[in-house]
Image (cartoon, rainbow, N blue to C red):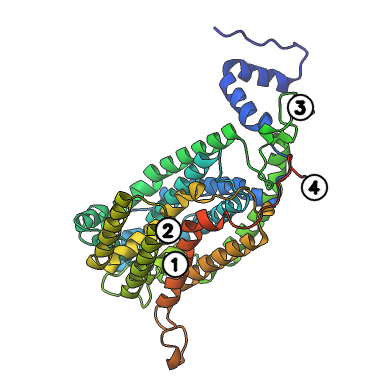
Amino acid sequence: MAQFKEISPDAPLGAKVGNWFHNRFPTAFDAYAKHMSQYYAPKNFNYWYFFGSLALLALVIQVVTGIFLAMNYKPDATPGAAGVPLAFASVEYIMRDVAGGWFIRYMHSNGASAFFIVVYLHMFRGLLYGSHRKPRELVWLFGCAIFLCLMAEAFMGYILPYGQMSYWGASVIVNLFDAIPFIGPDLSLYIRGDYVVSGATLGRFFSFHVVAVPLVLIGLVVAHLLALHDVGSNNPDGVEIKEGPKGNRWSPDAPADGIPFHPYYSVHDIVGVCVFLLVFFAVVFFAPTGGGYFIESNNFIPADPMVTPAHIAPVWYFTAFYAMLRAVNDMMVNVLLAVLALGTVLALLGRWSIVGKIVLVVVALAVGFLLKYWDAKFWGVVVMGGAVVTLFCLPWLDCSPVKSIRYRPGWHKWVIAVFVVSFLLLMWLGIILPGPLSPNPKLGWFTNEFISMILTLIYFAFFWLMPWWSRLGQCKQPPARVTFKPH
């Protein structure tokens, strides 16, 4: 039996209560000390480091509001009064008759957009300051898994209101699996649970949305934080504070350039939380549909399998990948063949053995044959999935001698800027209708698909040429210790 810690009888009541819990649940107090009060983070965090805690706040908002929504939601596509599906009617009931239901529903729907905004910015900060580099590869991999899990969670939740865009968006996305050779049709049927999107699909997606995926998501978040605290946080300088001098006012064994996460950064993050909540509730109260980008107007119409919307597009946080999917046509396949041929020729000019060159040519011919043999729709699915899978490879693609963008050549910032602009343009192209972007007949070639194809190539070139371009240029010498300016 563990030895109890004694406390003076004259101690304050709060200290006595704390000591009582500490003697009976020391593991919780040890975990608090390890991950909060005795976890030493670099003292030079800037405002970019708000988004990690904001992502955790967004997750809490989604879980709490989702619990209250699940109390009144019915995953049933059976037509009820006036032929309205019961799932859609239950959402209307929440909005109109449940006390505060409209507020909870709008918090949940806008919380999804807020979650993706802070996650995108959190990942961008990692790209800027090299948070994916050694020794934080596993932290980045857990983060990418969270992003992938979040996409699945958002997609499954998107169908639940069972409006027009929910129904047809789910139909389009699930039907994409048909393009997978051999197993595609059976896989689509298994995902839907029926030959079309129906009540069986709602039941499956509801179960995954409220139970299975959130459990996985929360587990990944815990793993992400534990892995981060084991190796220590990165900072804008990309300097490892654990490798520097030791000793500060809190502990002689602590990094000299570190400060306790609590209370310093827990209080520091309150600034970001206040700004986030101010903007978030402004949207919830004054623009809950986000101008049609957060909740499409078609989703306020009950799902009707007999009426197809004029334009089917996913929510804004999926549109970049949807634009990549639409960009893959026969022209794109021919471009990929040309890129494959050029890459093979350049590789053959390298120092390969005869056997290596033969294997390379055989593999290139096999890939080229498959590019022409399989439908462009399948390769569109591959490109869309590859855009996410590529993020997992980033720790091994970035070969720059330094981590932080602060000490890389100036033109590296322009490369990242081109990548960001390309991704934002893909988001926009995924929202608008396909077809010509100009009414001028002479610019008939200037179509949504053509521009999306170019931007998709830029997206993949940014990552897969990174082993080459990230080495170029003269890097500045990073400081031996972090640079800190009060703010």
Q: Is residue 398 left or right of residue 32?
A: left
Q: Which residue is mark 3?
A: 247
Q: CA distance from mark 3 to mark 1?
A: 49 Å
Alpha-carbon span between mark 1 and mark 4: 39 Å
User: Toward the viewer: 361 or 224?
Assistant: 361
Give the residue type at disc 1.
Thr
Q: Verify CB contact (< 8 Å) between mark 1 and mark 2.
A: yes
Q: Mark 4 is on which residue type?
A: Lys
In the rendered image, residue 424, in percent from the top left (x then y), is placed at: 53, 67
Labels 3 & 2 near each other (Cβ < 8 A): no
Instruction: Please state which amino acid type lies under the numbered disc 2.
Output: Ala
Image-quadrant location for residue 21: top right
SS class, disc 3: loop
Q: Residue at x 71, y 28 (%)?
A: 254
Badge 1 crowding class, 10 Å Cα cut-off, few under 14, some 14 to 19, many 20 or more, is many
Badge number at residue 456? 1
Decide which of tag 4 and tag 2 comes sooner along the chain: 2
